[in-house]
Image: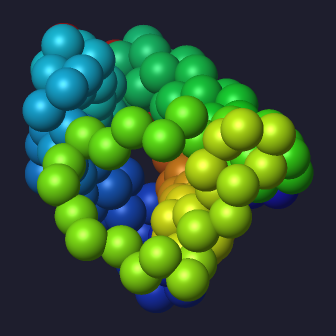
Amino acid sequence: MALNKCCCCVNLRTGAIVIAVLGILGSFGQLHDKEHIYIGIISVVVGVLANLFLLHGAIKYNKTTTLVYLIFEAIFIIGYIVGMCLVIAALVDKQFKLGWDGTWDFPVVWNTEDLKILDGKIEDVGTCAVVVGYLTATLVAIIIGIALGIYFWVCVYSFFGDFKKQGLPQLA
């Protein structure tokens, strides 16, 4: 499971530094949802903090801060897997397709040919297709994020394993 190089050509320490810098920059992508701004702020703070631990661990050869990053990243990966399961559950749920109560959040003129009435509720075929498309795109993005997260975690874990092999001193 251990790697000798990160991204096939870079040594593990340099790879860990690049992963940390990209992680710090990528953490700010969590601020996209205005409705759940508190969750976004917490995600940004925890993401930046975790990647600062990795940056410190890679620059100073600090085993403890690298381990803290590995723990945070494992928790993030588990969170992404839970999110993936929720998206899959939404995609297979028949109720979300038939459960629209007929209220709109914004004024839109819809094509009345696409409207169906089932059990007293209006089902809009176009809206349903958009929701399924959005959930499918979200699922693909989550799967790519999980794959990259696992690969980066393995790279950093390999860097962490080199501490034992090389017997590097613990610089503070």
**Going 58% across and 68% down the picture, which residue do you hit?**
115
144 relative to 10 in the view: left or right: right
- Whether 28 is drawn above or below 152: the answer is above
Whether residue 121 is visible to the viewer of this picture, yes or no, is: yes
Quarter of the figure with the C terminus: top left
Task: State the image coordinates of residue 137 (x, y, percent, origin top left).
Answer: 54, 71
Task: State the image coordinates of residue 160 (x, y, percent, origin top left).
Answer: 54, 37
Marker count (numbered): 0
107 relative to 91 in the view: left or right: left
Viewer-closest of 38 and 53: 38
**Going 35% across and 18% down the picture, which residue do you hit?**
65
Whether residue 146 is visible to the viewer of this picture, yes or no, is: no
Viewer-closest of 89 and 51: 89
Viewer-closest of 119 and 40: 119
Quarter of the figure with the N terminus: bottom right
**Going 58% across and 22% down the picture, which residue do you hit?**
75
Viewer-closest of 136 and 52: 136
- Whether 91 is drawn above or below 74: the answer is below
Quadrant in the picture for residue 140? bottom right
Task: State the image coordinates of residue 147 (x, y, percent, origin top left).
Answer: 65, 62
101 relative to 41 in the view: left or right: right
Colour approach in the figure: rainbow
- Whether 119 is drawn above or below 7: the answer is above
Task: State the image coordinates of residue 124 (x, y, percent, origin top left).
Answer: 57, 63
**Going 55% across and 83% down the picture, which residue do you hit?**
113
